[in-house]
Amino acid sequence: MRFLKTFFALALLITLSTNSSFSQIKTMETIEDVAELSTWENDRYQIFIGGHINFGSVTDAFKSSYGLGLGMQKKYFFVGLFGEMGDLGDVQMKTGEMRSTHYGIVGPWIGVRTNPNKKLGFYGSVKGGTGYGNYSIMDGEGEDIEDPDNIHVIRPEAGLELKLGKSLNIAGHLGYDFTSSIHEFPAIEDTDLRKLNFGLTLRIMTGRK
């Protein structure tokens, strides 16, 4: 009897030790699997469509600009292309006259979004575009005189992005437009077109992380 008790006690101890070791091995394998899945190589690409609206002013009144972009995100980083149309308001020329100023640009869009799997994360991007600037004025006879011109914009922006669901993200951000123009006609300083702006960007993500 003493032998059987000793035998069963030893068997139970070996069984418990084996189960404990097996559980530790499974836990380590799970941790390794999660770590492997979170690496850059195993993170999936996501295509997104993004629309944005910005508000800023080079005059006393706030004006808006609207844009649409298409891009690809992998882990923290994204890259794409965007197009934008905007209204700068009535800008004063070197000659002293005021001209209604509109523009349209296209260009690359690169950015970063920290904690892509969490609800809230830091959002930062840089948009750079080139296109046209249209400076128009009403003459004394009521005719609209236009002076088209090339225009270039670089806009760094930073803010926070909130995940509203599996495929919908919205970001609020502050940015600054570094605007330059060939501006042979009309005569205007580059600094007259530069401005601080704030805006919202909505990104619709495809696929699942």
Image (cartoon, rainbow, N blue to C red):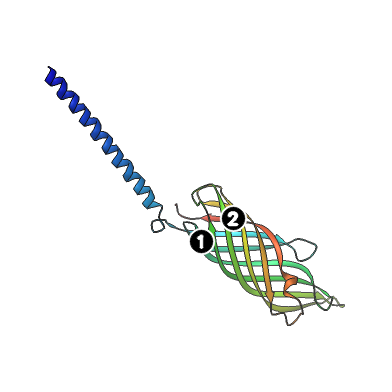
Residue 199, image x and y in percent? 66, 57
Q: Residue at left 70%, top 74%? A: 133
> Can you name the residue that lies furthest to the top here?
1
Q: Can residue 25 be seen here?
A: yes
For the residue pair 138 and 150, the one nearer the viewer reads as: 150
Q: Are marks 2 and 1 in contact (CB under 8 Å)?
A: no
Q: Residue at left 70%, top 78%? A: 149
Q: Can residue 101 be seen here?
A: no
- The picture quadrant where one finds residue 55 is bottom right
As drawn, 183 above or below 124: below
Q: Residue at left 59%, top 64%? A: 126
How would you rate the neighbour count of disc 2 (Cα within 10 Å): few for under 14, some for 14-19, many for 20 or more? some
As drawn, 89 above or below 160: below
Give the CA separation, mark 2 to mark 1: 14 Å
How would you rate the neighbour count of disc 1 (Cα within 10 Å): few for under 14, some for 14-19, many for 20 or more? some
Q: Residue at left 71%, top 78%? A: 148
Which residue type does callout 1 highlight?
A: Phe
Residue hosting label 2: 202
Task: Name the disc covering residue 147, or none.
Answer: none
For the residue pair 9 and 19, the one nearer the viewer reads as: 9
In which quadrant of the rendered image does the N terminus lie? top left
Mark nearest the camera among 2 and 1 is 1
Question: Which of disc 1 and disc 2 is earlier in sequence?
Answer: 1
Residue 39, image x and y in percent? 40, 55
> Can you name the residue that lies furthest to the bottom here?
184
Residue hosting label 1: 78
As drawn, 57 above or below 6: below
> Viewed as shown, does residue 7 lie left or right of 138?
left
Which residue type does callout 2 highlight?
A: Leu
SS of the residue under disc 2: strand
> Viewed as shown, does residue 51 lie left or right of 95?
left
Residue 74, image x and y in percent? 46, 59
